[in-house]
Structures are given as C-alpha cells and as structure tokens.
Amino acid sequence: MASLLAILSSILWGTSDFEGGRLSKKHAPLAVLGFTQVLGLVFGIVLMLASGAWSAQALGSGGYLVPGIIAGLFGYFGLFCLYAGLSTGRMGVVSPISSMGAIVPLTYALINGDRLSTITSIGVVLALVGVFCASGPELSQGLPLKPLLLAIGAALGFGTALTSMSIGSQSSALMTMVSMRGATFFVTIAIALKFRTMGGFTKKEYPSLIFIGVADFLANVLLGVACTKGLVSIAMVLGSLFPIATALLAFKFLRERLQRVQYIGIVLAVAGVALISAF
C-alpha cells in the first residue's frame, strides 16, 4: 500500500509540474507557484473540515505544526532556487541535481532505523540514478558555479521539506500539508504585495490552476500517508520519481524529444521500482 501511494504521489506531482511548467511559459513562475499554493490551501482546509483532522496533535513531540511550517518554508526555498537556477539556462545542470533531494529524507530514515534488504537497496539506487538520468543531465558545456550552487540549494530545500513532511505525517498527513500551505500563504501574499500583481491569469486558465493546486496538495498528502504505512526511505524514493512523469507528458503532448540518457533513466527507474515493489 505504501509503495502504491508513493507512486501515485509521483504521478500527481509530475502531472502538476508539467501543467505548471506549461503555464510558466506565459506567466511568471512565481505567480503560478503562489496562486496554486493558495488554491491548495483552500482545498486542504475543505478536506480538514470534512474529515475532522484538526483534532490531531499539533504541538509538542510528535506534533504536526512545526514540521509542517518547516516543510512549507524549505519547500518554497527549494522552488526559488530551482526557478533561479533554471533561469540561468542550464537546465541540464540544475534539474538533475535538484531531483536528488530524496537523498536527504532517505539518509534521515536510514539513520533513524529503516533497514533495507540487499535487493531493495539495489532497487533504491537504480531508482535514484534513473530519476537523475531521466531529468536530462547535460554537462558538455562545463559545470558553472552559480547553477551548481542553486541546484544544490534546491535539492537541500526539497530534501528538508520531504523530511519534515515525513515527521509531521506521523501525527497527521493532512494537517501537516495544511500547515505547509498556511506557512507559504504568507510568503505568497508578501510577494503579491511587493509586485502588485495576482499573475494576470485569464478565466480559461483557472481550471489548470485549480488542477495544479489540488494535484500538488494531494500528492503531498499521499506521500505523507505512505510514510505512515511503510518504510519512510522507500516512500521517499518512490515519491521522487515525478520527473519521469513530467518528461513523458512533455514528450506526448509538447512533442519534446527525449535524450538517449532520459530513456536509459526511465528504464533504470522502472527496474528500481520493480525490485522495491517485489521485495
């Protein structure tokens, strides 16, 4: 069950990232990010009221509030580094390195007691290498310092956010995600006030924005639940496969050609998932 939830999380994340990337070609990426984060918060509040999840422990050891806030702020930091890195035009450097954020929660889980069999460990390595390759690494033009540092910042931001999500989800996955969106809500408002804009979206784009906000929120919740149903290390690795879904959607709908290394990455990731799921 945990593996299935984590894979579904990856599919939702990859799909929302694809749609977010498509809209970001017309609008400022931070505007798309901020608007969809607010929509995700609204959706999360509706789920919270419908499920009565607010009764979960919020504070103290094992509470969801502090981990949720940390996850939200570090996730936003990771996205800022990612967008800044991509703006340098070195996507082949930034995207693969930033996708390695799963190494942070994987390391945390192993230090805190997760034990993997030899076959499962091989599957984890294959999946991580597959994600790296599927992101389209391109180092033929060297490794400039600024994109490298931004990519590492993105990976650490995402990794810290994922680790905090896994901690808060032990109390309540849903409330952890609501806390995340609550924290980023204030960041979004500050950015909107600074630039005095709501993004300039048209009515025809609202369905896409709603989808991105809801899909991203659900992806977080599913991954959080997966962390409570099985090993955190496995859930985080399987939840990090979203770049593959994004690449395949871009190939299918935008006619973007995949590099040979991306095909190799997809095969490696699928092999890794098969080993993890079978053992």
Image (tube, rainbow, N blue to C red):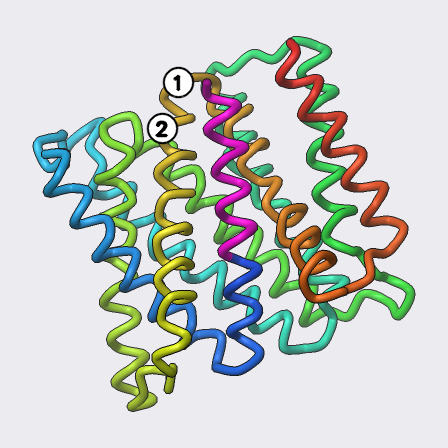
Local packing at callout 2 (Cα closer than 10 Å; few below 14, some 14-19, many 20+) is many
Residue depicted at 73% across the width and 46% down the height: 132
Residue 144 pos. (x, y %)? 77, 70
Q: Main secondary structure of the magenta part?
A: helix
Q: Is residue 207 above or below residue 247?
A: below
* Horizontal relation, residue 110 to residue 228: left or right: right
Q: Is residue 112 above or below residue 194?
A: above
Give the distance between the C-alpha atoms of the residues marked 2 and 1, in whole angstroms.
7 Å
Is residue 243 located in the magenta-colored stretch of the structure?
no
Q: What residue do we see at 58% from left, 31% from top?
A: 238
Q: Is residue 96 above or below residue 186?
A: above
Residue 33, percent across and down?
A: 41, 68
Q: Residue at x 16, y 48 (%)?
A: 46
* Image quadrant assignment for residue 170: top left
Q: Mark 1 = which residue? A: 229
Q: Mark 2 touching mark 1, by CB under 8 A?
A: yes
Please indicate whether residue 117 sits to the left or right of residue 57 in the image: right
Q: What's the residue type where badge 1 is placed?
A: Lys
Q: Quick check: 115 above or below 94?
A: above
Q: Say which residue label 2 marks.
A: 225
Residue interval drawn in magenta? 1-16
